Image: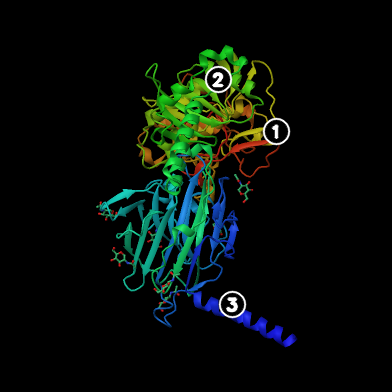
Amino acid sequence: MFNLQHILLYLSVCSVCLTFAQVENQFIYHGFSGANLYLSGASKVHPNGLLELTNISDHQIGRTFFPFPFKFNKSLSKNFQSLSFSTNFAFAIVPKLPALGGHGIAFTISSSVEFPGALATQYFGLFNSTSGNLSSNHVFAVELDTVKNIDVNDIDSNHVGIDVNGLISKESIPVAYYSDKERENKSLELISGNPMQMWIDYDEEDKLLNVTVAPITSLKPEKPLLSTTIDLTLVLLDSMYVGFSSSTGVTTSYHYILGWSFNKSGPAQSLDISKLPSLPPRRESSKRTDLRIIIPSITVSVVLIIISGIVYVLRRKKFEELREDWEQEYCPQRFSYRDLYTATKGFREKELLGFGGFGGVYRGILPSSNTEVAVKKVSHDSKQGMKEFVAEIVSMGRLRHRNLVQLLGYCRRKGELLLVYDYMPNGSLDKFLFRSDTPNLNWVQRYQILRGVASALLYLHEEWEQVVLHRDVKASNVLLDADLNGRLGDFGLARFYDHGSIPQTTSVAGTVGYLAPEVTRTGMTTTSSDVFAFGTLMLEMACGRKPIAPERPPEEMILVDWVLECWKRGVILETSDPRLEGKFEVEKMELVLKLGLLCAHPTPAARPTLRQVMQYLDRNATLPDIPLDGPGIGLVTVGQEVAGDCKLSFPTSNEYSGLSSTDSILSYGR
Ligand SMILES: *[C@@H]1O[C@H](CO)[C@@H](O)[C@H](O)[C@H]1NC(C)=O
Ligand SMILES: *[C@@H]1O[C@H](CO)[C@@H](O)[C@H](O)[C@H]1NC(C)=O
Ligand SMILES: *[C@@H]1O[C@H](CO)[C@@H](O)[C@H](O)[C@H]1NC(C)=O
Ligand SMILES: *[C@@H]1O[C@H](CO)[C@@H](O)[C@H](O)[C@H]1NC(C)=O
Ligand SMILES: *[C@@H]1O[C@H](CO)[C@@H](O)[C@H](O)[C@H]1NC(C)=O
Ligand SMILES: *[C@@H]1O[C@H](CO)[C@@H](O)[C@H](O)[C@H]1NC(C)=O
Ligand SMILES: *[C@@H]1O[C@H](CO)[C@@H](O)[C@H](O)[C@H]1NC(C)=O
């Protein structure tokens, strides 16, 4: 008895070995139920076999690898363990918001399944801002990228890229496929939510890599999307893992893999579409695209019934708004949803100006007045506080100043709030300062912008009926109108209080790098903490760099400290923005740098008021001498203990261009 069992066990173990030996150079999965893959981070397999790399939560990493490494670079048996490989997989990217995905999927061959220090967002969970382009990485990836990230030289928000040891793609190309029937290239939208297939074939002999993409229903197109020579000899080690890595950022998508074949002994077998698991039913936000998946699988008559049903529901729901009695008094500030829908051409992707923590901002033209506006869509579910919130919006709408972005009004729907602002054709200031693809602002323009923002702040602090604290003054919240005048926007964190009373707040708000030290200590914001942030903005404008620059040498990392240090050494002008090429009035440059330092003084009492700032800028008063020694002028807010309920937003270095992860609701223009 014992012997028999023993033998049976032995046999079964052996057959497992045998099966694996046979498949060790190839595999094919239609769905991944029971596939025993190596899953890490957010990735999981649904009961129907669908592999989900990430869901739509922000800043996630999801990876999946075949559990055993493959032999790549051994010249023992030429065909068997060469560098050549072939793979075919079916994937789908379903964005949370119809027009905005984040960030994509990377087919990955790597020496390890661990990626220490790797980040989400544009780094795909494979690298971080410093770990790219090292030959010791041994990572080869083909990325399906749905976000344009300037810092890794992305070409657009819908491309395939070939990545060797880093994310600055060796080659990239907008996603398209060659239709054999129509004999032409057709573009494909990765974030359409529709399933698609990808083929990657590498031939060691010619060192030729082919990448091909097509809709799920197509056969492999005759012509690849991208065919490029690349030598992987130094990249692929003897033993390498194959799999996928995916990440989300502020914008998010579900990233799915439906099926996958991989082969080192010949072309990867084609997937049998009928055996692939289906995608979960779509949320209402993407009803229209949903149809495209349903249609092939059910009969025409059912489709007709569904279409008419959906059309009926859509018709009824399309323009539905929420209105309550208490809103009567706000009638003048209320826009109809139908008007905003028409203005933005149905919130078309093409009209999208930007995207903040809460939702997209769309350009529109109001049908009634023909005026250009920016419409911010904010998801807002809570009934609680809606009354106070709308009252606050209406108050903000009553602020009028030529250097403020005017809030024109709002509209309310179920779960959604729409805010209508003046349209600012030139976008936000940070793009002009920090991006190489925008025209340079000359010194006169910069001075003019600073003066404008200062006068807007003066209005908020002293000239309106209440004191308004902006609480989030920074370059990305300054928008530029058609004449390049600076206009302060984003009142998402603003607070109102009566003149003469003492502001009370326990939540820390603002952006790291612009936060006055006392704010992080006590949670209390005052007019002088706005002055502090403005001081930082002045230095940014003069020096053309961000308040905190981790990539710089330690002594230059903190802008305030660096400027102060240079001043002490008598070389303050060395900090001026190289893009100005020395074309500035020395006196005014010195004034801005020194006044910036004074405003960013760590002691609130030492900072000037905005009225004084205006006088200095207009040269109606002379800047007092600032004692250069004595207890530290200079900020060190980074890394400080932050108390209480936090509402911080961070500078944009880890996110894509112009977007920060700030959660201020009323912002527009980032
Ligand atoms: C996404 O998955 C994580 C766990 O990986 C979970 O905590 C989170 O709630 C999920 N988010 C959504 C929107 O389902
Ligand atoms: C980047 O990753 C490396 C490891 O690959 C790690 O040592 C380094 O600290 C990380 N850098 C950042 C900025 O996270
Ligand atoms: C990567 O490093 C190599 C050599 O060190 C260099 O030639 C190349 O320009 C770098 N590529 C990128 C994209 O930084
Ligand atoms: C299709 O795209 C490929 C790759 O980008 C290009 O080489 C080819 O010329 C295009 N063909 C047509 C018919 O446009
Ligand atoms: C890659 O594509 C080229 C051009 O279509 C073709 O000649 C070659 O055989 C392909 N190579 C592989 C490995 O698929
Ligand atoms: C791959 O094999 C070639 C030839 O045997 C060798 O020169 C190369 O160093 C190997 N590459 C790696 C990464 O081991
Ligand atoms: C791998 O290639 C071999 C030789 O062409 C073929 O017989 C086999 O079916 C392929 N397997 C897979 C999983 O693609």
Q: Which mark is residue 522?
A: 1
Badge 3: residue crowd in 10 Å (few <14, some 14–19, many ≥20) = few
Q: Is residue 132 left or right of residue 46?
A: left
User: Tags 2 and 1 in contact by the CB under 8 Å rule?
Assistant: no
Element carrying mark 1 = helix
Reading the chain from its start, which is encountered first: label 3 or label 1?
3
Q: Which mark is residue 382?
A: none
Image location of residue 111, percent across then percent down: 51, 68
Which amino acid does the dot numbered 2 rest on? Met
Residue 500's place in the image compared with 647, above or below, is above
User: Distance of mark 3 from mark 2, alpha carbons?
Assistant: 70 Å
Of circles 2 and 1, which is in front? 2
Q: Quadrant of the N terminus?
A: bottom right
Tell me, yes or no, if residue 210 can be seen here: yes
* Residue assigned mark 3: 16
Q: Which mark is residue 396?
A: 2
Residue 19's place in the image compared with 574, above or below, is below
Most foreground residue, 391 or 80: 80
User: Distance of mark 3 from mark 1, alpha carbons?
Assistant: 64 Å
Which amino acid does the dot numbered 1 rest on? Thr
